[in-house]
Amino acid sequence: MTWTFANLDLIVELTLNHIRLSVIPIVLGFAIAVPLGWLASRRRTLRAIIVSGGSLLYTLPSLPLFVMLPYLLGTKVLSEINVLVALTIYAVAVMVRSAADALDSIPAAAKEASTALGFSPVGLFWRVEFPLAGPVLLAGIRVVSVSTIALVSVGAIIGSRNLGYLFTNGKQRDFLEEILVGIVASLLIALVFDLILVGIGRILMPWHHSSRIPGRMPSLRAPAARSREAAV
């Protein structure tokens, strides 16, 4: 533990950079994947193209992608933009299937009732479809969060300053403590991110949480009910 206490400043710096490099792709991936999932839920042909395309993107090896992006984007080899773009691609690839499944699973009766009440397509999405799809979307973004936090470390190979540095430097020095510190710090970040996402889900979707309480009936119609009241 002597090395850990002597290098706390370095560990904190790398941890903060790791968090920053994780948050941006998670948010961007969600923002891009949800509209794509909405399109996929509307047309079977589009669904096959979008979901299959996402699966193919996720099969791309991360290290070659990090190396290729500077040539494709015209950025510097050590630019963080390369890491952020690569991680966003993987986030979209993972999230788009969850988004498509979430929006496709909404009962047709709920959408028909909302349309009959005069909801516009935009209002239907924000007031009915998006809230009802929330639990599945939350599950998807939790998977994206863990995946992204793990993939950030690969960026250290091309010079990105994150916890992956502790893995590569520890391996070169054959120093186990440094590697273990990197692993523990990454796990803690993943745990904190997951707890934050669960907390956000409970705040934004209280009907989903209450439906799990014994003796309470599931309330899948809660978002739609509030939407009907707003329309009236």
Image (tube, helix red, strand yellow):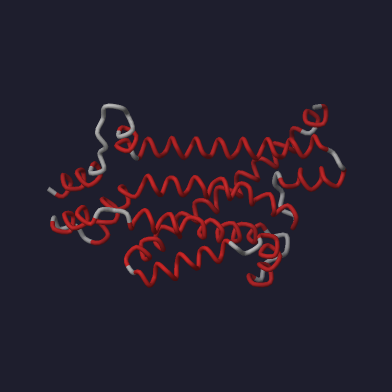
Count the numbered circles shown: 0
> Residue shown at 45%/67% (left/top)?
50
Residue 43 position (above or below residue 183): below
Q: In the displayed image of the protein, which residue is found farthest to the front? A: 215
Write the residue at 58% across / 50% down. Answer: 148
Residue 119: give x, y in percent of width and height: 19, 57
Residue 23 lies, with reference to residue 91, above or below; the image says above
Quadrant (top left/top right/bottom left/bottom right) for the N terminus: top right
Residue in the foreground of this view, choosing between 73 and 226: 226
Q: Residue 229, position in %: x, y?
A: 16, 44
Drawn side of residue 211 relative to residue 76, left or right: left
Q: Quadrant of residue 112?
A: bottom left
Q: Is residue 224 left or right of residue 36?
A: left
Rendered image quadrant of residue 219: top left
Find residue 105 and report its horizontal and vertical position in percent. Answer: 32, 54
Which residue is at 66% across, 67% downward?
69
Q: Position of residue 202 (x, y in %)?
A: 38, 35
Q: Is residue 224 left or right of residue 143?
A: left
Quadrant of the rendered structure where residue 25 is?
bottom right
In the rendered image, the vertical position of residue 71 relative to residue 219, given as above or below: below
Q: Residue at x 42, y 38 (%)?
A: 200
